[in-house]
Image (cartoon, coloured by chain):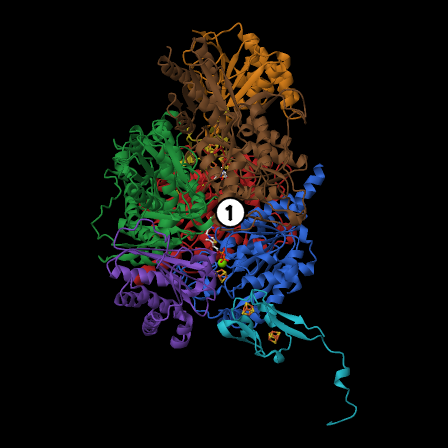
Chain colours: A orange, B brown, C blue, D cyan, E green, F red, G yellow, H purple
């Protein structure tokens, strides 16, 4: 958990990555860390490839953009092709197994997880794929505590959706656990 | 207000800073990347008894805040490049009629529509020279979310103290970035209110000032019944074409700022003392420069960073001193070289002035700056 | 000296800078009579104007007065009124100021139905800059920028105001001074956006180019061409051609903007 | 009805206040509006186009001149008795 | 056109110069002291088959001439300070979309409404920096009625050659003054027409340029069916957000000017060769300086005058040379010191830079300049 | 592929950048059908737009296309048309573009009766900037800048156009695609300023905030609320409350500006 | 009228061109308009919200889907005989 | 006639001084001289004191404004008080005897002539006072030839008014002749 984490979350416009980034950042604040969160804007944000970035550090954070991700999330093919480059050696990359067919060569540990599918099938709403992903990546990376990310999540989601979101998050935690014994590619 | 640290966006910090400073009248027209300021204030202002007004365009917004200010309110508008261009005529009016107001310009990539969502710092010179005719201007430029809050409060303080429009020159990086910030409690930060006349109506000359050159300002509706115009005017506020009075007025407008440069101009400088090379940067770019400077120091290069928070009036004395000391200067900004021109002017040949410019819609990367630092440094005196 | 002049004018600014015979002075006279009858608090009344001959009006009146930029009077006034709704706000604006460069603010102020009493000094020309045609210059008329006769069609300003949402709309002339006073009174009492269009004579920039004779001749022209709706009704189309209706043209009720906002504040507060 | 004794002595009727037309030459711009609109030809241009009250006796105190003067330069003033 | 000398006003010379250059589309909104340009063109343009359009405001005027230019017409608008401020957004559009057009700004005293009829040179920096974002600009400034004609023709030539808006920065002195002038016959003066594409529609890339960096420009209605936008765009004219393309576009916009500085920049210099002191002045002020320099020479002082006709791009090389030669420089202008900043910058400490500034609504008198010349000269090297 | 799409679109720019279900694409489809039926010369037809989602339309169409600054499309278009009257000029503009920042150019283009066919994409919101209320947002509606419900009154745009002088004024919706095509045809045939207001659905910025359901739901809302003048006549006031009239609302004849200017040139030439 | 010999042989009637509903998946944005407006339930969302021609045989070639698709992604194409 | 002439014409807004200045300048052009003409603008031009200035010279003219008038014309009191200062020694100053009561001390030869009165009484139109003045000052100064000023005048005036204007000009010439034997003040 200590040290600086550069996190890049990417996917298509409607997948809620910015919210995921905000929740992650707020979780880190609860953990007492410094954070900076940025995102890509523009017409691209409506579709195609968009991204949200979070830097978490016990130190003051100067440069606010992610240069080389420690943690990468890719929820669609286009964004993986566009934004996955530059992952750090031994970094962590999580892609959606249902939506991403091709993963470029990377120095990171790559996990291909059924994020959207889990959201659709086990929560019944694709909409919460971002929360499933959040669960998976925080559990896999350990950069924020499970308690903090849960608290941060529940503060942000609309009233009435808490249970659904908590479930999605926990499914994400679960995916992480399973994954730890199923690394897809490490090169 | 909570004392907990929160994740706050730069634009949000600006909106909250404005409320903290006592701003209770906002008028604007949406434009990326400043829109969040309006959206937040649309919700927040009515909660604190303030007024939020969405006008038909930027010209009207600027006009409306001047009208609002005359009733005694602290006022603000927010915009970006295209809207900033449109506001220029009425910004000049505010200069001439000495109306306190704050204009946030969250810079995006221009010219023209450019790229609405891309960061840039291309309006630095426009902030100074955008309206016709000679006029002094104050512009502040924050580098972090926390500073967006603080400089917004300062912007109001300066506007009220000197009866001037103050430009809060943000950039998309700072406006859209979210950081952990603990907002100050009321009272923690100084808040300046405008000086009102204490004399009777008969003795009130709205443009007559004491030594500090800023006249007390009466509110409309309080019985002073005075005249405000964008024409040159005498102390009484009425139009004149007399050269000697014009001269006097225009001088006073400049002097009220120039006499208080020490109060107005703030900047930070880090590791400049022993530096052979000082990088001058502001806003989002300064964040990349900070990183680059750290890396350069790690490489054993004596490099510092000078970061103006007040960009206009230009911190001429401080930068002049750096130049006089013979340190190499490197200006990093997201434009084609704007503050650079001022640095060159002020250096006046006393030190080398280099630049690291980028204007392609992306925040300059520390690497790029570091490379430039190395390049310039190699030829630094003593190396 | 007339008491209403003494009371409401900045006497040291008189004589005003308008040309001999210019109708603007007549409008101001009617205005201060209306203010007097309305018993408005002089300290809580603001005059906002743009730029132009007409717009110089604000400087002569002893209130808080705001002489703004060209075309923007209504936008400044919106700021004043919205910030401090308890002020009585009058807007004094020329036809160019209001309908050319200021046209957008005009339709939006009307749409918002914000409580401003707007008096348009319509002299059918840009007077201050020396007589270029305005959006209110009749077709075929001469102006320095229409040396071959104006090819454009003028606005029907009152129709425009009604369509944009104004809740009180009236028209009269500098000849009909009594009516003008009455219309200003009625307009000011309307809780919403009120337009009073005053056809005024500009002997220097409009009259001269269009051979309208002396200032008195121009006043007589107004007398003969501005008629009541009732009289207008009884005319045949030919007779109507060069006539225009004066009086109240439209009056309705609608939510006033600053009042609505006040309600929101009360709801939240 | 000539010479009837029953006629009231005119001097006993309470008089309307007498008015007098006054031109403020400092404000008058010689536009001629008052002259043109005075139905009683009270007013006239004099030397150097000064507006003069040429025939004060004809004035019926109608106030038209005062009403139309764009410069507030002509007024009906009540005469001191 | 008559070969007789005539008494012509500066604004009239501008109007006639425009017609001479082939301008056939004018759109404007009246404003003192530029109005005569519109009034003359309202009469003259229909006589030569041209179009005169009075728009509802300055923003619309600027928009309309851009529209007109796209149909192939040579176009122009004229204004003064307040209107110039309003036009800024669309001037930026013309820079970005590379639309040839000429904007005459007959400067009056600002800021704000200022004094409509008083001379000033307060819009020099605004001409360069008035619109948001980085953009190059060309601005020419005449000193006589004859030159108002000539530089108007040049303004069109440069606009058409480089596909840029060109600012004709006049001042009230030159705009309203009448002088004896013999207007040139057709053919006497070069007139440049824009380069049109010769390729087929399929091969036409509206923003693809050869070495000179200015792309050929197709007219609307001639079958090229292309797209024009104020967004950053690629060679095809369509919006892009790709940093490398933005970079390339913005560089090209600057280079198309910077590569041709020798062609674009003109100035006159008199008696500068042997001078110890060179006065730099332009527009109406240069007339007073001419007189003062004559008087100074009569007194035996070696003084010359350097008069930029092209004020932007700034004649950096020529003035740099003067500075390098160690001559004292004295900048005389009717403002608070605008071109002065550039002179200081370029001098870079190599020579003393002094100023004689006036901004009170009156043309500076030769006496005032002479006094300043004497003062500066006393301490000139060799004296 | 549909032949009218193939013929009049820049195919390499498709799919367009509009959100899933956005009505703008439907309007463009109707537009190219109208152009096809009008047999306009593709090389002599220009599309001018401002800034906004709607205004992106110009980029997709295979004509000379001019994507201008926010609110100024009509002013640019006036320049194009006045300089070269033989071009067919269409203006594609959003409700904000046209009636907020662009309101003045709108009323002046109407006043001049210049021959421009203006299609207003009225989605009742500033879509591109993420859903702030516009001058066409109904009272009480939610928008990001009216979190407590919109306090302003919207324009009646067609009334405004008529009052300003437009000679052809019509309204329809994205549901009424056939009518839209017909109205564009009729509007373009009018020799003067023509306004076609199209009520279009913006599921992302307007629909979501105002709980309007799916894009299809929004289309159905249009179907149920936009009715012909005849049907409207037969409703009682209550039934009328949430209905609006579609079809041709105004048609008249008046001198067209570029034609008048051409006459002047011929007279002098 | 059952089994009447006078009935025309169906195959001899000149057929209206057969149409087929085609979805251009590259352009389709899955907005669902076509599905909602098809009265014949020809169309449906499939895997990953792909628009699918689920029941082509029900299509009456009314063109509604084509008409309302904001992305020109669904068309009626004439089938080659 | 040779040498440089600095001429300042002043009066109230409506008195046609700018036209007089233009005609004078055009006369000088006919005479082959260089000229610059300037004027005061602004609200003041509608009344009060306004001025038109002409510089005539065989040389190039640099500074376009009159610094010290060789010839001054004052058609009303206000303008005389405001603009007559600075007249050159031996310069020429002409004021309207009917409208100017007070002439400030001056080094110029001052002529007080019944210009407006002549226009009113002998031409019947006060309007042509400017032309009478033009006649008087050109004849008194000799800075332009009578032929040139007549030609210049007739080119500028509206059709149908040529005779009236010519008459006014000649009355001005006449006033000058009379004046040469009736100098009012020289100090
Ligand atoms: C932005 C701007 N544009 C143009 C002008 C020049 N100008 C001043 S007043 C005026 C027109 C005045 O016409 P109107 O409003 O009808 O007033 P009037 O003088 O006729 O009373 C113009 C064009 C200006 N001052 N500012
Ligand atoms: C001068 C200026 N002000 C503001 C903006 C920001 N802006 C871009 S589009 C837009 C509103 C668009 O609304 P509308 O015209 O209704 O189009 P829509 O996106 O809804 O189709 C705004 C405010 C801008 N680009 N330029
Ligand atoms: S120009 Fe016309 S409007 Fe202006 S003051 Fe003179 S008469 Fe009045
Ligand atoms: S109306 Fe007034 S200003 Fe005009 S002449 Fe009469 S008194 Fe003088
Ligand atoms: S009061 Fe009437 S009668 Fe008397 S002078 Fe005036 S207008 Fe004439
Ligand atoms: S935001 Fe609205 S108008 Fe814009 S593309 Fe999306 S749905 Fe269409
Ligand atoms: S209407 Fe078009 S874009 Fe929408 S789902 Fe159907 S085919 Fe796809
Ligand atoms: S053509 Fe008609 S029936 Fe066939 S799929 Fe489309 S909407 Fe359904
Ligand atoms: Mg007017
Ligand atoms: Mg919209």
In the picture shown, does residue G80 fall above or below F139?
Answer: above
In the rendering, at what x and y percent does residue A90 appear?
A: 47, 7
Q: Quadrant of residue E315?
A: top left
Q: Pointer 1: what residue?
A: B245
- Residue at the right extreme of this rendering: D6
In the picture shown, does residue F18 fall above or below D58?
Answer: above
Q: Quadrant of residue D39?
A: bottom right
The answer to which of B196 and F8 lies nearer the viewer is B196
Q: Decide if residue E288 is on the left or right side of residue B292.
A: left
Q: Residues within 10 Å of mark 1 (few under 14, many from 20)?
A: some
In the rendering, at what x and y percent does residue F30 appear?
A: 43, 44
- Secondary structure, mark 1, is helix
- Residue at the left extreme of this rendering: E187
Residue at mark 1: C-beta within 8 A of ligand 1? no
The answer to which of E124 and E278 lies nearer the viewer is E278
The answer to which of F144 and C228 lies nearer the viewer is C228
> Which quadrant would the N terminus of chain D be assigned to in this image?
bottom right
- The subunit carrying tag 1 is B
Please state the total of marks drawn on the protein image.
1
In the rendering, at what x and y percent does residue H140 appear?
A: 32, 66
> Which quadrant would the C terminus of chain D be assigned to in this image?
bottom right
Q: Is residue B272 visible?
A: yes
Q: Quadrant of residue D25?
A: bottom right
In the picture shown, does residue A66 fall above or below E367?
Answer: above
């Amino acid at each position: 958990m200590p040290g600086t984490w550069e996190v890049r979350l990417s996917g298509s416009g409607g997948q809620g990555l910015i919210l995921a980034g905000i929740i992650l950042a707020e979780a880190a604040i609860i953990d007492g860390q410094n954070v900076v969160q940025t995102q890509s804007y523009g017409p691209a944000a409506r579709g195609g490839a968009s991204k949200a970035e979070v830097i978490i550090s016990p130190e003051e954070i100067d440069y606010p953009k992610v240069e080389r991700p420690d943690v990468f999330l890719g929820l669609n093919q286009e964004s993986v092709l566009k934004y996955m480059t530059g992952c750090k050696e031994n970094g962590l990359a999580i892609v959606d197994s249902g939506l991403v067919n091709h993963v470029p060569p990377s120095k990171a540990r790559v996990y291909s997880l059924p994020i959207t599918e889990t959201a659709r099938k086990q929560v019944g709403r694709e909409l919460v794929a971002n929360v499933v992903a959040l669960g998976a990546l925080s559990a896999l990376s350990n950069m924020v505590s499970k308690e903090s990310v849960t608290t941060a999540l529940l503060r942000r989601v609309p009233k009435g959706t808490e249970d659904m979101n908590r479930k999605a998050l926990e499914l994400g935690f679960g995916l992480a656990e399973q994954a730890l014994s199923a690394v897809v590619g490490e090169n | 207000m909570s004392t907990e640290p929160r994740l706050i966006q730069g634009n949000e910090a600006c909106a909250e800073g404005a409320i903290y400073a006592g701003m209770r009248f906002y008028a604007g027209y949406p434009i990326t990347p400043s829109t969040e300021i309006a959206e937040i204030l649309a919700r927040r202002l009515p909660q604190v008894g303030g007024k939020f007004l969405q006008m038909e365009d930027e010209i009207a917004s600027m006009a409306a805040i001047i009208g609002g200010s005359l009733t005694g309110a602290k006022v603000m508008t927010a915009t970006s490049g295209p809207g900033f261009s449109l506001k220029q005529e009425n910004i000049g009016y505010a200069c001439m009629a000495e109306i306190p107001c704050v204009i946030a310009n969250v810079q995006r990539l221009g010219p023209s529509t450019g790229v609405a969502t891309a960061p840039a710092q291309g309006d630095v010179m426009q902030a100074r020279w955008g309206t016709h005719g000679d006029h002094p201007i104050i512009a502040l430029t924050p580098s972090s979310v926390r500073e967006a809050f603080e400089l917004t409060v300062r912007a109001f303080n300066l506007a009220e103290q000197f009866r001037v429009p103050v430009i809060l020159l943000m950039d998309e990086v700072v406006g859209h970035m979210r950081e952990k910030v603990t907002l100050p409690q009321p009272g923690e930060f100084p808040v300046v209110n405008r000086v009102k006349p204490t004399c009777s109506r008969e003795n009130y000359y709205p443009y007559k000032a004491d030594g500090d050159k800023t006249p007390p300002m009466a509110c409309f509706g309080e019985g002073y019944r005075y005249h405000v115009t964008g024409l040159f005017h005498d102390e009484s506020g009425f139009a004149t074409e007399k050269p000697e009075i014009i001269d006097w007025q225009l001088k006073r407008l400049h002097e009220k700022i120039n006499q208080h440069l020490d109060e107005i101009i703030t900047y930070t400088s880090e590791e400049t003392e022993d530096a052979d090379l000082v990088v001058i940067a502001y806003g989002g770019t300064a964040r990349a420069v900070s990183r680059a400077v750290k890396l350069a120091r790690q490489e054993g290069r004596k490099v510092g960073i000078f970061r103006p928070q007040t960009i206009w009036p230009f911190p001429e004395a401080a930068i002049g001193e750096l130049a006089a000391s013979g340190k190499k200067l490197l200006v990093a900004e997201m434009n084609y070289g704007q503050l650079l021109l001022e640095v060159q002017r002020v250096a006046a040949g006393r030190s080398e002035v280099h630049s690291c410019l980028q204007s392609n819609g992306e925040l300059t990367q520390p690497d790029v700056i570091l490379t430039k630092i190395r390049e310039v440094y190699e030829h630094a005196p003593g190396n | 000296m007339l008491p209403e002049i003494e009371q409401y004018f900045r006497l040291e600014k008189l004589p005003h800078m308008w040309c001999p015979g210019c109708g603007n002075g007549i409008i101001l006279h009617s205005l201060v009579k209306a203010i007097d009858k309305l018993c408005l608090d002089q300290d809580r009344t603001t005059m906002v104007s743009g730029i132009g001959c007409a717009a110089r009006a604000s400087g002569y009146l002893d209130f808080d007065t705001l002489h703004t930029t060209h075309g923007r009077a209504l936008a400044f006034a919106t700021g004043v009124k919205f910030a401090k709704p308890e002020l009585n706000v009058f807007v004094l604006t020329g036809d160019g100021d209001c309908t050319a460069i200021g046209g957008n603010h005009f339709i939006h102020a009307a749409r918002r139905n914000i409580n401003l009493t707007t008096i348009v000094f319509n002299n059918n020309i840009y007077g201050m800059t020396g007589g270029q045609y305005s959006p209110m210059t009749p077709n075929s008329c001469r102006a320095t920028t229409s040396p071959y006769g104006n090819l454009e069609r003028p606005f029907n300003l009152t129709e425009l105001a009604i369509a944009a949402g104004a809740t009180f709309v009236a028209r009269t002339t500098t000849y009909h001074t009594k009516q003008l006073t009455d219309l200003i009174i009625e307009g000011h009492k309307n809780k919403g956006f009120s337009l009073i269009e005053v056809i005024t004579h500009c002997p220097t920039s409009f009259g001269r180019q269009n051979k309208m004779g002396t200032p008195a001749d121009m006043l007589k022209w107004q007398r003969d061409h501005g008629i009541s709706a009732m009289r207008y009704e009884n005319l045949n189309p030919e007779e109507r051609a060069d006539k225009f209706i004066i009086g109240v043209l439209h009056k309705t009720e609608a939510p006033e903007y600053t009042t609505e906002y006040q309600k929101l504040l009360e709801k939240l507060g | 009805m000539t010479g009837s004794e029953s006629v009231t002595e005119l001097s006993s009727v309470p008089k309307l206040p007498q008015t007098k037309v006054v031109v403020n030459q400092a404000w008058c711009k010689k536009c001629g509006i008052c002259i043109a609109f005075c139905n009683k030809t009270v007013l006239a241009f004099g030397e150097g186009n000064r507006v003069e009250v040429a025939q004060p006796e004809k004035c019926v105190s109608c106030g038209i001149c005062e009403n139309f003067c764009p410069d507030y330069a002509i007024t009906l003033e009540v005469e001191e008795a």
